[in-house]
Each structure stands twice: as structure tokens, then as C-alpha cells.
Image (cartoon, grey):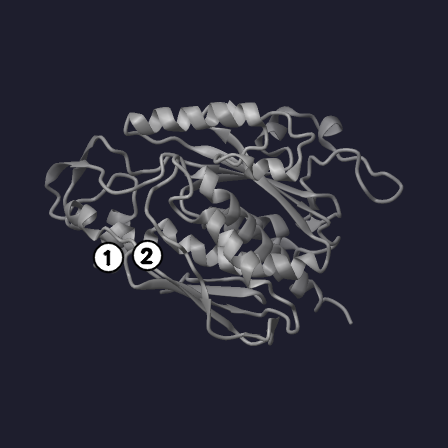
Amino acid sequence: MAGSTFGTLFRLTTFGESHGKAIGGVIDGVPSNIVIDLELVQKELDRRKPGQSAIVTQRKESDTVAFFSGIFEGKTTGTPIGFMIPNEDQHSRDYIEIQEAYRPSHADYTYDQKYGIRDHRGGGRSSARETACRVVAGAIAKQVLNKLGVEFSTYVDQVGSIRLTDTSFFLPEAIESNPVRCPDEQIAKQMEALIREVRSEGDTIGGCVRCMIINVPTGIGEPVFDKLHADLGKAMLSINAVKGVEFGSGFSSVAMRGSEHNDIFEEDGSTRTNNSGGIQGGISNGMPVELRVAFKPVATIMTDQETIKQSGEKTTLKGKGRHDACVVPRAVPIVEAMAAMVILDHYLRNKAVSL
């Protein structure tokens, strides 16, 4: 399928459907002789997998990854890294009704229009299950970037109208201290209560994930079309349910004046503020790269909705199966993975700029 490969030098190609035998991928462009901790890769997958808490989908998948190539005696060989994750807990019978009917705001209708055929079981290729493959590639990218001192801090900062406004200080371990992955304990409890309330009503709700990338080398990113924030934006918008991305001051900058928004330089090249989000002219400036990603409410709701069949006949459809009431807690490692892939890809590209 066209569009299943991401990246320029560091590339990921994924395959598989939600209810097929397995999902997997091929990662190409990983430098050789990098020590890879496979337990850390699995740990990242465990952060994304379903069934990890009471507020996410209860599909039971171990998401155990198996590697087939590209890693020898614990080190990368420089050749393509092939991997696979078996699907273990499919309930395809939950999707019989949508074999002919289209779920509102899903990809059912558009896939039919594009391909003339679709795997209706769990959404097939359009399912967010595919994102597990991205987490594998991102986990490897993060381990390469770790050699450069690049670090990530990614967390949920909004669910519905409940938002974390003070992000000035928190301990990194606070992110994983609760099922919502919000570093503020009290706000996390409010978010969790809201998700539980929405779930009990058979409904869903959206939220936002904030990602900060620290120690990004200065000078990565390409001018004009391949700006660093343009590629980060594409990466984030390729994630299921993402409807918006902002960098630095983002949309709030429209209410600011230039004298307020400009990031004034210090003598060492750093800036007093970071309204640019660590990127200027599409190129990293050495400040933390800051982005915020907005996720819509999950399209599958457990209440009746009007829709149409393939024939155009009107019908009523009620959601079935096991679904998230809010995707953002499980989206945190996906956002981080996609960001890591982009940063590593641009770092490798930048090595070819000059001798």
C-alpha cells in the first residue's frame, strides 16, 4: 500500500491489519554498532498496549515483539531491522454489523471509495493497532538519540476541558505514576474521573499530548519544504485521531504582538523565551523542541447513530467491541516515538550537509 513508509534516511515501513495474524515492519537506515536494549523496546510497547488500566480498551494483547534481522549479538548491523507483533485477542464478530454499514467519522466509507474493498474487522489497516509498529521504531530511534544526549518528556496535558496549565516543574517519574499519564496528581484524578464518566455514558472525549525534546542538536531541519516542524507536524498528523499540532506558543501567538513573541538571544545563543518551540526557519536552534498534539474523541461510541449502508440505504448503528473512551493516555508513547523518528532522520540527513 502506498503511504506505508515514513522517513528519508531513517525509514519505517509497516504492514498488517487489526484482526490479521500479525502486524510488523521493517526499519531501515539505523547506524551500525548501536547497542539495542530489547527490554526497553518492549517496555515502550507496554506503555501503548491495550488493557493496561481500567480507563482504556480491554483488548488483551501482550504486544510481544519478535526481531528477525538487523540486530546481532545485541548491536545493530546497519542492515534492515525486521520485526513482527502477533495479534492475539481479536473479536471479529463484534464487527459483523459494519461489514455493509459505515461507522460515522471512521475510515470505512473512505476506504471503500478509494479501494473498492476493505477489511471491516476492527477497522483493518486503518486501526490504531498499526501504531504499535511505530513505537518499536521510535524505541530504537530513542536509543540512538540517547547517545547524543537527546531526551524526551511527553505527557497528557488536557482531557476535555480539564487542562494542566503549570508545566514549569514536575518529576519525570510523575508521568507514569497514574493511568492518565498527567504529571500533576490532582489534575490527573480529575481527568480520570471525567474519562470514567464519559465511558459510563457510552461516549468518548478528546485530549492533548505535550512533547518536549531536550538537547536537540542545533542546526537540524531542512529549509523550505522539509522544515523540522513541517516533518514533525506530518508525523503527528499521521497518527490516528490527531486533528491539530502546535509548536511553542502555537495558536496563542495570534493574540500576541511581535515585541512580546520574539525570543531574545542570550550571549550563549540560547533565548530568554521559547515561543518558537526550539525551531526557527525550520531549523533547530538548540532550545527544547516543544509541540502539542490534539486528539479528537474516539469515533466509536456505544450509543445509536444514524448512518448508511454501502447501498446508500439509511440504517442505525450501535458501537460494539472494546474501545478507548479517550485515546490520549495510550497516545503518549506514540507521539514520543514519531518525534524520535523525525529527530533521528533529520540528524542523519544533516550529517550529509558538509564534509
Circle 1 residues within 10 Å: few <14, some 14–19, many ≥20: some
Residue 225 appears in the rendering = no
**SS class of the residue under badge 2?**
helix
Q: Quadrant of residue 20?
A: bottom left
Query: Is residue 221 rendered to the left or right of residue 114?
Result: right
Q: What type is the residue that disc 1 sits on?
A: Asp
**SS class of the residue under badge 1?**
loop
Residue 128 appears in the rendering = yes
- Separation of marks 2 and 1 at Cα, in angstroms: 7 Å
The front one of 22 and 205 is 22
Above-or-below relation of 149 to 267:
below
Q: What type is the residue that disc 2 sits on?
A: Arg
Q: Are marks 2 and 1 in contact (CB under 8 Å)?
A: yes
Above-or-below relation of 256 to 114:
above
Query: Is residue 52 rendered to the left or right of residue 320?
Result: right
Marks 2 and 1, the one that precedes in the sequence = 1
Query: Is residue 197 rendered to the left or right of residue 6?
Result: left
Q: Residue at x 23, y 57 (%)?
A: 118
Image quadrant holding the C terminus, namely: bottom right
From this viewpoint, which residue is outermost toward the right?
A: 267
Q: Residue at x 40, y 35 (%)?
A: 326
Image quadrant holding the N terminus, namely: bottom left
Name the residue beneath numbered marker 1: 119
Number of numbered tags placed on the structure image: 2
Circle 2 residues within 10 Å: few <14, some 14–19, many ≥20: many
The image position of residue 93, as x and y in percent, is 17, 50
Residue 201 shows which numbered tag?
none
The front one of 226 and 193 is 193
Residue 125 shows which numbered tag?
2
Above-or-below relation of 232 to 323:
below
